[in-house]
Image (spheres, rainbow, N blue to C red):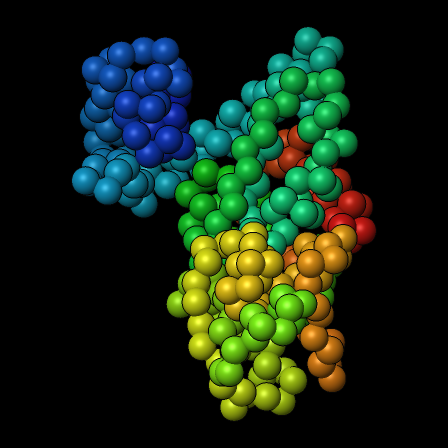
Amino acid sequence: MKLNTDRLNAFYQVALDKSFCQAADNLYITQSALSQRVLKLEQELDTNLLIRSPEGIGLTEQGKALFEYVSDLQAREQDVLNQVTGRSAIANGIIRVGAFSSVMRSVIMPSLLPLINSPHQLKVEFFSRELRELPPLLLSGEVDFIVVDAEFTDPRLQFELLGHETLVHIRNKASEHRLDPPIFLDHDAHDVTTYNFFDTQGMADFEFDRCFYDDVYGLIDGVRLGFGEAVVSEHIIKDSDDFEIVTHAKAVTSPVILCYVKNRYMSALQKQVIEHLQQNAPRHL
């Protein structure tokens, strides 16, 4: 059996966009034509590939297997086209990376800047997410790489250490903004950074209130405005004079780890992404 290319491309785009409407726009076809291509592919394979629900589009187990196949096919095709036409090995590629907020803007993006600014007509997609949201982003194929702060057990994944962040306790320099008990700003109720920091200092019984400011830049703005204190990555605030860094007995660091799927085809561009992150990320941390 030879699978129809148009139907495969239609399925792949829907799986990427998680929306028939968006996928149809990206393929420059009508939504009806797109739906027909996906339906015929499912009929041809005699299986359901997509899970359709009010929350959006998901993939069945069979759909995930086919998505992996088409993803590899797309990457291999681009590499071969570049080779045959004599273009750069990374021309017309797409860089797709997900990371948590304290490293995305200050570490990942500048580390990839030389590659992005190269004359190869590259497209770039960056996704700043909470740590718990990153693994599904990678396994669904929405991104090719994620950056996390800890390895987790999954035999499908490869992990590579890029370096370590140093965490520091910051507060507004003005004493009138200090409360008792202090208020610490975290991302959300799931964020345990502050708890872990004080636990490492032997201060597990330290009492404080919490407020939530969505991402690390919200925390920093909140501290700057005197709304509370925070534990943040030192590299984000090292050029700012707005904060007092509170001295503690122990240095606290957190790993910055690159993660990708082991057995997916690694394109020439994706290899370049890994090299640039390995070489450049440490000096931004």
Residue 40 falls left or right of residue 7: left
Residue shown at 56% from the left, 70% from the top: 177
| Residue 120 visible in the snapshot | yes
User: Residue 61 lies in what quarter of the image?
Assistant: top left
Residue 189 falls left or right of residue 204: left
Q: Position of residue 162 (x, y in %)?
A: 72, 55
Q: Position of residue 52 (x, y in %)?
A: 21, 37
Residue 182 falls left or right of residue 201: left
Q: Tag count in the figure?
A: 0
Residue shown at 80% from the left, 46% from the top: 279
Residue shown at 52% from the left, 78% from the top: 179
Q: Position of residue 202 (x, y in %)?
A: 62, 89
Residue furthest top as drawn: 85
User: Residue 112 lies in what quarter of the image?
Assistant: top right
User: Residue 174 lies in what quarter of the image?
Assistant: bottom right
Note whether 100 is above or below 58 in the view shown. below
Residue shown at 48% from the left, 49% from the top: 129
Quarter of the rendering occupied by the N terminus? top left
Q: Position of residue 14 (x, y in %)?
A: 34, 28
Residue furthest front as drawn: 176
Note whether 172 is above or below 17 in the view shown. below
Note whether 29 is above or below 211 in the view shown. above
| Residue 165 visible in the snapshot | no
Query: In this orientation, which residue lies closer to the viewer: 52 or 166?
Result: 166
Query: In this orientation, which residue lies closer to the viewer: 65 or 157?
Result: 157
Quarter of the rendering occupied by the C terminus? bottom right
Residue 81 falls left or right of residue 22: right
